[in-house]
Amino acid sequence: MLFGFLKDLDPRLRSRRRQWKERIIQGGLFLCAFLSVITSFLIVVVLGKEAFPFFQEVSILEFLGTTWTPLLEPRSFGVLPLVCGTFLVVVGASMIVIPAGLSTAMYLSEYASSRTRSVLKPILEVLAGIPTVVYGYFALTFVTPILRVFIPSTQIFNAASAAIVVGIMVLPMVASLCDDALRAVPQTLRQGAYALGATHFEVTTRVVVPGSLSGIVASFVLALSRAVGETMAVTIAAGATPRMTLSPMESIQTMTAYIVQVSLGDTPAGTVEYRTLFAVAVLLFAITLIMNVIANRILGRYREIYE
Amino acid sequence: MKTTNLTARQRKAYLFRLICAAISWMGIGLLAILIFHVTSKGISWLDWQFLTGFPSRFPERAGIKSALVGTIWFISMTACFSIPLGTAAAIYLEEYSRKGPLGYLIEVNIANLAGVPSIVYGLLGLVIFVRGMELGRSLLAGSLTMTLLILPIIIIAAREAIRAVPNSIRLAAFALGATRWQMLRFHVLPQALPGILTGVILALSRAIGETAPLIMIGALTYVAFVPEGPLDAFTVLPIQIFNWASRPQEDFHHIAATGIIVLLAVLFFMNIIAVSIRHHAEKKGKV
Amino acid sequence: MSKQTQSLLTLLEAVGVTIYYSDKPAVQEISISVPEHHITAIIGPSGCGKSTLLRAFNRMNDFIPEARMEGQILYKGNQLYAPGVDPVDVRRRIGMVFQKPNPFPKSVFNNVAWGPSINRYEGNLNERVELSLRKAALWDEVKDRLNDSAMTLSGGQQQRLCIARALAMEPEVILMDEPCSALDPVSTARIEDLMFELKKTYTIVIVTHNMQQAARVSRFTAFMEGGMLVEFGATKQLFTRPVNKRTEDYVSGRFG
């Protein structure tokens, strides 16, 4: 007859030690998860700590001015040219990515065979994985020369090249998210429309797309938020000239490019020039945060409808 | 497709389909153009001297050794920090966390952190790691910063992999008198491993190509030495490329392209290794 | 460890057990005594709460956050739900076999060996595995395939593997939740034979919706309906001369 091996050691003793071990493990895992909360908190603290004294020296009204020369005399801290530069790039990118991303998604989900999908999707993923420096280089050395052929007034550094390239960069993300959104529309909805004698085109544009509209819109907002935060492509290709202009052919500077420019220089800590880094970063952070929250809200509400 | 008897509606439908297809395949075209352009500009400058030399004022003599070694150091350190942290956080959220305000707070933060521009992480790293913890412009500061940046990516992918493990396995383990950690360590984690590795590959690929945060940390752009320890200064491939691309001389643009070829090769190589690890893990999981 | 044959020693007991799922009672005021070295069956129509009651015996309901229990479960006179009791300990003494076979995606050997190995078993693991597989009447079929994946076994073999896995922990009680409902009649018959063998060493509680099975294998049967215990007694008597009319209706197939 076999003796149960569990009965050798005092069961209460082993149990307590085991329970302590479990609790320690759980605590450790919790800390790792809580790190995200700590990181967010630190970002706010780090940005705020330098931005706060900045706004004590420079009033908000002045900050919203239209001349940005923080490093040269006469100093001016109107940030709008940087915002304008970012805006130009983002709008230009969206003109590419919204139609192209949606069309690609429609093709992938409604028309393409699964074999085509299995070729296209990985390629899109490769496009998404290319580092942004490479896109910046491509903009400067390929897109800009071509643009200059067609529009001779294009400067060497211009917003348009950057916008085109940022659009391509963000395309896979939009295509993938829109594809998910379109596929989430139930087959029964489509079949109802077909049964009424609609063509594939009509079903896609009049039933499927409207039925997944919030998912599509959310993906656009997320993509544009990424475009706002994009750094290297615009730094390389769009220029370092803060300027209030609506012409995409001119050299401009985005918020992100400005931050890079200052970092590459030798600005001592504690000066107001150093603090402009953080002031611009606060603005950048706020814009992208708001966009992301909006997009996630839309996505959240959208998921409830089909579940 | 019959061309006779097509009503206007059907013709429109066909046209629409063509347009969508054309646009989609343009994506492939663009990729091909990009690769072709970069290769044509840079391939002639790719030689052994380029791979083993240091940067120089003269493009013909410039090399990428410091950036290449720096990248390898950098990615290894980032992986060492981010893989355990990300996996641990994902385990907590999927297996231990209860629906409550704390869990909600963590999840909201992860979702938001995923969308923060990389340059903001750079500022964070500058203030906390470079200045605050006085790590200087070192590999350690850079990899800690990059860890924070890619953590949300790993967490999200790892969570999905853990969620995919069927619940019957968990119940079976519990019914045998296993503790939660025993169940996770011996059953759930091994089964979720391929999925977790996929997320890690994705995250590290992103980390290799990220430039902005490292510029903020102060990774140097003219480095004529190879780092020897975690506290050394360093540079990475994307920063070297950025430096060369920013110079006005045409020749520097050429070697920037050569650098890009090396960077893409590293990425490609890394993905191959990672996919084969994943494949191996999937096969091993069957026994 | 001598066997106590004819005496009916109560090993497991439910006393006034009520289990709520989010304030809806799934099990109401049930009291049952499970005697040692016998097979006790719990029968009843779908949704009557039999699985919920079974899970209470090895504290598997702990994993369902909406579940709340009142009353007591006693094991050898000790309260299983007392504050200091570690549920992990409970589950090492009271094993469970599930309705759908759920072997680990590991080899046959590792499935059976895992339980003892996490308990730092110091004896010979190979012997323990072989013994458990023999007790589960599976050894002859898998002895040359110990390193094959458990997923290559048939459904009936997988279920016997799950039984072997539970046996490897040397429990005193084995709880079986409709163990044959996902299996074919031949596999079912083999497992029923197995149960007869096992009851000599272990105590078995089986939940089943198959009345004939309960009549075949068990010594005692509890009939549940709508969360309540309608009748509990010796199987022979419950099936031939039931006390309660509802029991008689159920076992003679008038409903359920």
Image (tube, coloured by chain):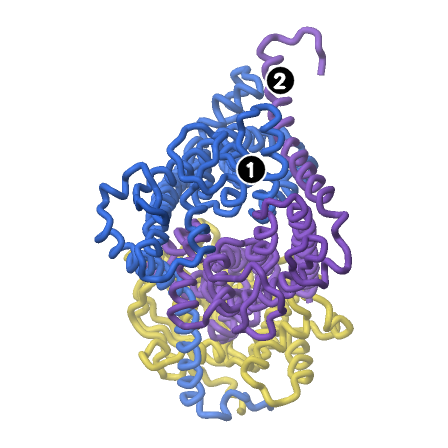
Chain colours: A blue, B purple, C yellow
Nearest to viewer (mark 2 / mark 1): 1
Identify the residue at image location x=54%, y=17%: A198
Mark 1 sits on what residue?
A165
- Chain letter belonging to callout 1: A
How many neighbours does mark 1 have within 10 angstroms: few (below 14), some (14-19), or many (20 or more)? many
Asked whether residue C39 appears in the rendered view, the answer is: no
Q: Which residue type does callout 2 highlight?
A: Leu
Query: In the picture, residue C157 is in which quadrant?
Result: bottom right
Regarding mark 1 in the picture, which secondary structure is present there? Answer: helix
Nearer-the-camera pick, A121 or C18 = A121
Identify the residue at image location x=52%, y=80%: C171
Regarding mark 2 in the picture, which secondary structure is present there? Answer: helix
Identify the residue at image location x=35%, y=44%: A69
Identify the residue at image location x=42%, y=37%: A85
**At which x and y percent is residue A80?**
33, 38
**At which x and y percent is residue B84?**
52, 68
Mark 2 sits on what residue?
B15
Q: How many marks?
A: 2
> Is residue B3 positioned above or below B150 on the image?
above
For the C terminus of chain A, the image quarter is: top left
**At which x and y percent is residue C182?**
59, 57
Question: Is residue C63 rendered to the left or right of residue B72?
Answer: left
The answer to whether marks 2 and 1 mark residues whose Cβ atoms lie closer than 8 Å is no
Q: Which residue type does callout 1 highlight?
A: Val
Question: Is residue A235 rendered to the left or right of residue A126?
Answer: left
**At which x and y percent is residue A83?**
37, 39
Question: Is residue B94 rendered to the left or right of residue C133?
Answer: left
- Chain letter belonging to callout 2: B
